[in-house]
Image (cartoon, rainbow, N blue to C red):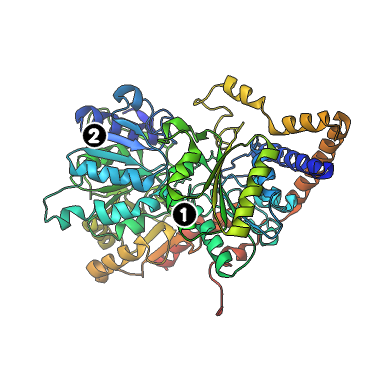
């Protein structure tokens, strides 16, 4: 299997879906001539032309709404947020229109569109450019939220998202674009709603997604050498969540630690904890531990930033706590 | 304008230029992180516009805020320390390049969401009118912001409610890699404000005196008649959009950048002053040397400042007590 970058995997997914279905188009700031702020859309303008790879002015609310209208008319928009920080401006279109039109119209209209782009804190970009907002989207009834951590998952899940009949929030890891990984040569899809065990283990289940998955794997490898067997699960799709996979792992390990880069209060980790307690209370030998971002806007200073997001030490400590 | 004042404008532009060049150097050494958007080429706008204000007037800026903050009078040492992410920075290291704030100089912030600060500036003007204060507020932004909803909502409100705000669009022709012709339905940016009945002007933003005159008129309207204005300053940025962008990028040619540099605001103004015998080459060089020396001190100060103590991570999130 060839090893490619996360950004290249996304690029392949877009290219293949655009070739397969001429209703699919890509729209956003700098996606065309600039080839994407993170180079995800490299070469697409050249292949598909201005009709299907569309540069927009800085108008997140506007072009996301254009996506909604186009989807109602039968097109398959892929809307790129230069970063998910700017999706806040498009929140009205996502929350009030994209996700509600099917319901409000009693099923007469569908809004199959993907809103995608990088998310998560990134090096010293400070409060307005460094945040994990996946919990916001997960909160909205009817919205599906995907957050792949590897090139293979990114490609397979983006293809599924584009083919899905609903609005999908597809959050790429801003720090993951240059991660390499094996990606099958032949066409494949990864179903939305299916998590994956990234590493088998028997002592504790570590749940993490996107960039945090890599932190989790790092910790698991370290602990393996110290004789602790950590099972690492990547839900991949945050909503719908692969609850059966998580529950079966808890029944095996009896312990869980959730690692989340976003803010703690009302975070996704809280919801996952509640679900797991509800469905597997008897299986637990220790309370679930949550390692999260600190509840502060992201500081600029390097040392403060480091202290604000989960790191190896904190994950190690949380695992230790569940084992004692 | 007195020769003294003219020399001051020149030295302020030079200070910003030298400060920015040093910031670029410090960025490449890893002393500065995150996004860093340099202002080189646009100095005449900040200096000309802010020179038309009184010290107690207010300024609001976007993420390309170094020049505005310095022109408003912030201590360059504290500005650099903020870029270094240190405790003696303007915002205790929490804001960084895109988020300068300085109550001492009435600088109400740098904001990183394009267009997001225009309503804030409008609110500042609202408060000034509400409190019957004599001050005005200048709001700087790029031509990219003119396409956002926030721009149009702000101009409408300011005009409807007659607020003392001056919106200054620094049209440097590119929003990241997109030239204005590919982002705006009208290339004439000043006309984009024409639906709202406020005062419009288009100004050569490379000419510090023209900027100053135009803003002086707008300040007068704001202060004495409580009327807003929208000024388009035609300018140019020499550097890439941010430090991660090569200087001319692939969206414009090197020749274009070189051509624009012929309009350099500092060189142009120096030539004018030297023709008028306000200062000669020698004095200009001395001025520059003095500024460069000052910047060395600025760097030493920033570098000596400690990183913020870890307990400051959770301070200033919410305040205690009632108000
Ligand atoms: C709402 C929003 N969308 C996208 C961005 C990413 N972005 C940052 S600066 C920029 C270009 C802005 O250009 P302009 O307003 O002309 O200002 P200039 O950089 O020329 O000073 C873009 C697209 C952002 N910060 N905010």
A203 on left or right of B105:
left
On the image, the x and y values in percent for residue A164 come to 19, 43
Q: Which mark is residue B143?
A: none
Q: Which mark is residue A24?
A: 2
Element under disc 2: strand
Task: Assess whether mark 2 and mark 1 are in contact (beta carbons under 8 angstroms).
Answer: no
What's the CA distance linking mark 1 and mark 2?
A: 35 Å
Q: Residue at coordinates 20% horizontally, 39% vertically from top-left?
A: A163
Kindly identify which residue carries mark 1: B154
On the image, the x and y values in percent for residue A92 come to 32, 55
Confirm whether residue A256 shows in the render.
no
- Furthest residue in direction bottom, as rendered: B322
Tag in front: 1 or 2: 1
Chain bearing tag 1 is B
On the image, the x and y values in percent for residue A283 come to 26, 68
**In the rendered view of the protein, which quadrant contains the N terminus of chain B?**
top right
Vertical order, B245 against A224 (above or below):
above
């Amino acid at each position: 299997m060839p090893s490619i970058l996360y950004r290249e995997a996304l690029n392949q997914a877009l290219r293949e879906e655009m070739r397969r279905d001429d209703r699919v188009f890509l729209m956003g700031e700098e996606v065309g001539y600039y080839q994407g702020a993170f180079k995800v859309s490299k070469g697409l303008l050249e292949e598909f032309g201005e009709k299907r790879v569309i540069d927009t002015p800085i108008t997140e609310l506007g072009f996301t709404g254009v996506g909604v209208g186009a989807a109602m008319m039968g097109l398959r928009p892929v809307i790129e947020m230069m970063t998910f920080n700017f999706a806040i401006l498009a929140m009205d279109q996502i929350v009030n229109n994209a996700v509600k039109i099917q319901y409000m119209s009693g099923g007469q209209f569908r809004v199959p569109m993907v809103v995608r782009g990088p998310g998560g804190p990134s090096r010293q970009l400070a409060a307005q450019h460094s945040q994990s907002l996946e919990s916001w989207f997960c909160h909205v009834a009817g919205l599906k939220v995907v957050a792949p951590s590897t090139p293979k998952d990114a490609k397979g899940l983006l293809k599924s998202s584009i083919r899905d009949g609903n609005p999908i929030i597809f959050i790429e890891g801003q720090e993951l674009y240059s991660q390499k990984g094996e990606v099958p040569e032949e066409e494949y899809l990864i179903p939305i709603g299916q998590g994956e065990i990234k590493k088998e283990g028997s002592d504790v289940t570590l749940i993490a997604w996107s960039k945090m998955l890599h932190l989790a794997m790092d910790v698991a490898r370290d602990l393996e050498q110290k004789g602790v067997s950590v099972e690492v699960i990547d839900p991949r799709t945050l909503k719908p969540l692969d609850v059966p996979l998580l529950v079966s792992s808890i029944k095996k390990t009896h312990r869980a630690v959730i690692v989340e880069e976003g803010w703690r209060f009302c975070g996704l980790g809280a919801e996952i904890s509640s679900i797991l307690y509800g469905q597997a209370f008897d299986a637990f030998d220790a309370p679930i531990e949550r390692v999260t971002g600190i509840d502060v806007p992201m500081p600029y200073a390097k040392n403060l930033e480091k202290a604000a997001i989960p790191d190896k030490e904190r994950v190690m400590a949380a695992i230790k706590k569940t084992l004692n | 304008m007195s020769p003294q004042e003219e020399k001051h404008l020149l030295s302020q532009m030079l200070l910003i230029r030298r400060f920015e060049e040093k910031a670029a150097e410090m960025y490449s050494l890893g002393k500065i992180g995150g996004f860093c958007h340099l202002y080189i080429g646009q100095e005449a706008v900040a200096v000309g516009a802010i020179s038309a204000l009184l010290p107690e007037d207010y300024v609001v800026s976007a993420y390309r805020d170094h020049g505005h903050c310095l022109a408003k009078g912030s201590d360059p040492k504290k500005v650099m320390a903020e870029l270094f992410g240190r405790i003696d920075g303007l915002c205790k290291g929490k804001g960084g390049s895109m988020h300068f704030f300085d109550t001492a100089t009435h600088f109400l912030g740098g904001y990183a969401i394009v267009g997001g600060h225009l309503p804030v500036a409008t609110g500042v003007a609202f408060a000034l009118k509400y409190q019957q204060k004599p001050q005005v507020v200048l709001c700087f932004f790029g031509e990219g912001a003119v396409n956002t909803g926030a721009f149009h909502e702000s101009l409408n409100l300011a005009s409807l409610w007659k607020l003392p705000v001056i919106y200054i669009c620094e049209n440097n022709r590119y929003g990241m890699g997109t030239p204005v012709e590919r982002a705006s339905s009208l290339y004439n940016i000043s006309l984009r404000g024409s639906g709202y009945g406020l005062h419009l002007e288009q100004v050569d933003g490379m000419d510090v005196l023209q900027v100053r005159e135009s803003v002086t008129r707008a300040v007068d309207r704001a202060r004495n008649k409580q009327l807003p204005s929208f000024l388009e300053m035609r300018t140019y940025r020499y550097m890439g959009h941010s430090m991660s962008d090569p200087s001319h990028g692939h969206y414009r040619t090197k020749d274009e950048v070189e051509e624009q540099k012929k309009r350099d605001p500092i060189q142009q103004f120096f030539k004018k002053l030297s023709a008028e015998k306000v200062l000669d080459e020698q004095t200009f060089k001395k001025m520059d040397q003095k500024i460069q020396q000052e910047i060395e001190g600025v760097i030493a100060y920033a570098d000596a400042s400690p990183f913020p103590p870890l307990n400051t991570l959770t301070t200033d999130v919410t305040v205690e007590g009632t108000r």
